[in-house]
Image (cartoon, rainbow, N blue to C red):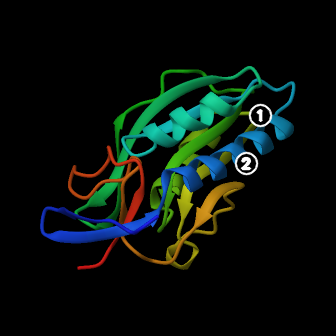
Amino acid sequence: MNPRTIKLHDCEFNTYMYEEEIIARITMLAEQIDRDYAGKQPLFLAVLNGSFMFASDLLKRVTIPCEISFIRLSSYQDMQSTGHVKEVLGLKEDVAHRHVIVLEDIVDTGHTVNNLLQQLKERKPASVETATLLMKPDCLQHPLEVKYVAQTIPNDFVVGYGLDYNGLGRNLRDIYKIVS
C-alpha cells in the first residue's frame, strides 16, 4: 500500500501502520491473553479516550470469559505529556481479588500507567497487568513492566486508531506519524 499523507490542525502525518497490521498484532495479544488467563475471568480496564478502538478490537478476539470497564485519565496537552495525571472518571467496580488487565492506547513516559497501577494496587487485586497497542521504550520515565505490547515504536508523535492530536484523528483506521 502507498503511504497516505493527512493534515490535522497545523501538522502533516504519513501512514505508519496499516489497519491490517494493527489487527494482526492485536489478534496475537488476544491469543496470549487467552492462554495466560484461562480459567481466571479477567476484568479489562480500558483507559479512555485513546484505548477505545484497541479495547474494542482486542475484546472481540479474546475468547475467555471476561468483563470490561472504563476509566478516564489524562496527562496530555497538545503533543506533550504534562507529567501530571488527573482522574476524570473513576473506577466503580470492586477489583479486590480480581485479575485486572489495564488497556492503554500508548505507553510513552509511563506517567498515566504508573499512576493508575498504584491506585489499583491499593485496592488489592489478585493481579494487575498492562496491555498496550503502542509503546515507546525510549520515553519511559518509570520502571514499568508492560506484559502485552502490540508494537514498540520510536519516539515519534502518532495519531489514528484512537490516538489524537488535540481531538482530531481518533477515527482513523490506520496509525500516522508526524512529518511536519
Give the SS element for disc 2.
Answer: helix
Q: Is residue 9 above or below residue 26?
A: below
- Left or right: residue 139 compared with residue 83: right
Q: Is residue 126 visible?
A: yes
In depth, the one of 175 and 113 nearer the eye is 175
Q: Is residue 137 above or below residue 89?
A: below
Numbered label tally: 2
Q: Position of residue 145 (x, y in %)?
A: 69, 61
Q: Position of residue 94 (x, y in %)?
A: 60, 21
Q: Is residue 68 above or below residue 29?
A: above
Residue placed at 55% from the left, 21% from the top? 93
Residue placed at 20% from the left, 56% from the top? 166
Q: Is residue 180 above or below residue 75?
A: below
Residue placed at 13% from the left, 62% from the top? 9
The answer to whether the residue labelled 2 contacts the one labelled 1, judged by CB atoms less than 8 Å apart, is no
Residue at mark 2: 28
